[in-house]
Image (spheres, rainbow, N blue to C red):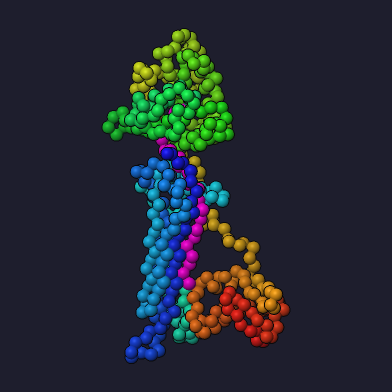
Amino acid sequence: MFIDEVVITVKAGNGGDGAATFYRDKNTQFGGPDGGNGGNGGNVIFVADNNINTLLDFKFKKVFQAQNGENGAKKRMFGKTGEDLIIKVPVGTMIRDYETDKLILDLDTVGEEKTLLRGGRGGLGNEVFKNSIRRTPKLAGKGKLGKEIKVKMELKLLADVALVGYPSVGKSSFINKVSAAKSKVANYHFTTLTPKLGMVKLDEGKSFVIADIPGLIEGAHEGVGLGDKFLKHIERCKMIYHIVDVSGLEGREPIEDFEKINNELAKFSEKLANKKQIVLANKMDLLYDQENYEKFKKYIQDKGFEIYPISVLFNDGLKEILWKTLEELNGIEREPLEIEENINSVFRLHNPNLPDWLIEQDEEGVFNVKGKIVENVLNTYVFSGDEGLDSFMYMLRKLGLEEELYKAGVEDGDVIRIDDIEFEFVE
């Protein structure tokens, strides 16, 4: 089974919280702060593995998460860093943000490693917060959450040459003859149900890869006959073999077939239409009128394309075109289809419209305090005990809480709720 597109969710590990602890032993009752830092969360890393050919494994598992960092502990013990999540994918895998369709990773080289998400940073232990004024801080840094993203993975075959042409023109037979590929051969539409790769080896160190793409029909760019699913695989090739049946024995008209296939390529992608294309006039052994070939040859050459007469059945003309192709490929760079987006530009605020302060009174008369400033403080620190609570309230007051409460109409004696903390407002 060939799976070329899947959607999964990946999440980096959360950072561990820093510890708010104090040194104690039988000789020391009130030691100084000794809380260790939390460990960083694990990263999410994608690796292009030549031993994997499809995205089938991702069809059944949809969520992938790196390990969280461990919390810090007393005696300055740092939390353990979470293990990275290594996700192996086939060479040629493109990873897009599911919501925007932006390309964020393009893995087109064997062994290539790219980090998609970095784990959340571990929080600082309370020892770090000690200073000349705050000698016994009961607060510590909270570990940062690992980022999470839903991605679409697409697999595009990284062949040097793509075979295109109508069904039954001899593409499967061609790739079977010139490579070790075993592509099914029969006379019906879409005989090749999945793209096949074949390695053409002409000499030691002289080889290239051909992709046998399922036959195209009119409307393929719109998805007719699953054509659009297969057309995208050609985009990564350097050049195209366009195989045409010139014998006419099945009632096909070579010029008409040639134009229709190229029309489908152009409608799907301008890049495809502009790739170098060599026309292979197949089934010359079955040609009953040489004039038909000469007419087709002139038409193709007038269009600016090279044409080679071949007979796949009798191996006629195959070696010549293969050596010619090797020479041509050496001068063609595989240009990137798209520019990778910076992953940081992909992430959006969970609630971009959330104001700095949001104070609302509920049915019981309690004033609930929310907003970006409150969330930032809660996500940055771990508060311990009464002194930690005092530090939390002190920070919020410094950031403007008191003024905002007055603006909201809070009076002496009203109840204020922040997260899971409730207190009575005193002027």
Residue at 47 percent across and 52 percent down: it is 62
Instruction: Give the total number of marks visible in the rendering.
Output: 0
Q: Is residue 135 above or below residue 222?
A: below
Q: Is residue 259 visible?
A: yes
Q: Position of residue 244 (x, y in %)?
A: 47, 21
| Magenta stretch contains residue 323 | no
Q: Which residues are magenta?
A: 142-164
Q: Position of residue 300 (x, y in %)?
A: 50, 19
Q: Is residue 414 above or below residue 377?
A: below
Q: Is residue 234 above or below residue 136?
A: above
Q: Quadrant of the C terminus?
A: bottom right
Outermost residue on the left side: it is: 204
Q: Position of residue 105 (x, y in %)?
A: 46, 49
| Magenta stretch contains residue 147 | yes
Residue at 68 percent across and 83 percent down: it is 414
Residue at 43 percent across and 74 percent down: it is 18
271 vs 200, left or right, is: right
Q: Position of residue 374 (x, y in %)?
A: 58, 73
Q: Quadrant of the N terminus?
A: top left
When asked about the image quadrant of residue 55, the answer is top left
Q: Nearer the viewer, residue 25 or 36?
A: 25
When asked about the image quadrant of residue 194, the answer is top left
Q: Is residue 70 above or below residue 64?
A: below
Q: Is residue 104 visible?
A: no
Residue at 48 percent across and 72 percent down: it is 142
